[in-house]
Amino acid sequence: MNSDIPSTSVERKVEEIFKEIETYIKSEDFDRALELIDENRTYLQQNADMHHQVLLNKHYAISLYRKIKDTYSKDKDTDAFVELFEKHRSYLEVHVGINEYKRLLDIYDRIQKKKIQGKLKIIIPVAIVLIGVLVFSFVNFESISLPNFSMPNFFQKNTGESPIAEEPSADESIDTPSNSDEETDELPSDEPIVDENVHNENEPNYILPSHSKELTLSDIEGMSSQDIRLAINEMYARHGYYFGSGANQRYFDQQEWYVPDESLRDASDVVNNFSDLENRNLAFLASQERRLRNQ
């Protein structure tokens, strides 16, 4: 607590802030509730007791969940919903209930499916027209005066037609471009994925190497839900997240590798800096922590 302010005054101000936050939540003004939390986060982290610290996270998660959900159900703004959900996805998965997160995920999946279907409605007719034009061109090849450009290599290969001068002949092999840079829907390999930019030599003694390898069940064998929760907090701490007063801050202050940044007080800002590997590991640890907690 701040020694310059009487304890009763601090407690009174904390209670007033929370009452105002709860008033906005009850009136479903979630934008204002989130703004009020952000405006007073530093003061509350420094002066609120543990009960209010937990309550603050609960209010923030509820307000964020309802704001994102209402963006879709009331405002019908699917683009805003997708933007908010993608920005706060990792935070929501950890801090809201399983059923609430699943509702948002179902809405997100439906929106993405409709977008794909909408693109297919445009692409498929265009593709059909192009195929029809190509077929017609080949059927009437001899009667059509071709423009002065080379036929694509794959047509030369299939039809046996001689290429136009300065193009490779049909007998020459045709290199197929590598698809290593293309996006795929395949699931990640079961083999551990190691970040080549991370040096393992003299690496700090982390709870889990969630920044440098794909975690599996074998990595968390024997760990409790509390252990996994601490490993999740470690991911934020590695990026300098400032936990404020409390057990988490005291624990990480004792770690030689921890360099806190007091400007990093919003978990969603830290998650935005996570690598793809860290985001996958965060989702994995969050699901396993809930599984152990619900056993």
Image (cartoon, grey):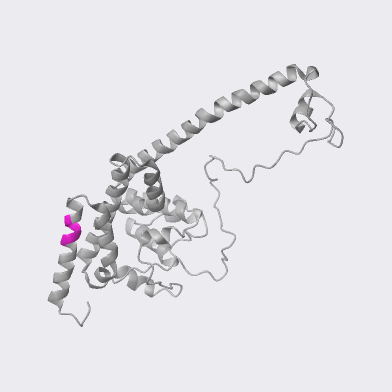
Image point (17%, 60%), residue name: 20
Residue at screen point 53% across, 45% down = 188
Q: Does the magenta stretch mainly form a helix, a strand or a loop? A: helix
Left/right placement of residue 192 relative to residue 221 reads: right
Quarter of the image with the N terminus is: bottom left
Vertical side of 163 occupied by 258: above or below: below
Left or right: residue 195 compared with residue 11: right
Number of numbered callouts drawn? 0
Q: Position of residue 38 (x, y in %)?
A: 29, 63
Residue at (57, 69) in percent of width and height:
201
Residue 53 seen by the camera: yes
Within the image, what quadrant is residue 8 found in? Answer: bottom left
Give how far across and how far down residue 280 sits, in percent: 46, 51
User: 76 above or below 154?
Assistant: below
Q: Where is residue 16 drawn, in percent x and y?
A: 15, 65
User: With 51 as the anchor, is 96 left or right in this view?
Assistant: right
Q: Nearer the viewer, residue 163 or 62?
A: 163
The magenta segment is 19-23
At a point 33% along the width and 50% down the height, the residue shown is: 290
Please say if 103 is above or below 239: above
Give the image location of residue 93, x and y in percent: 35, 50
User: In this view of the protein, which residue sits in the foreground, 20 or 280?
Assistant: 20
Query: Residue 259 versus residue 131: which sits nearer the camera?
Result: 131
Q: Tell whether position 233 is magenta.
A: no
Residue 149 found in image quarter: top right
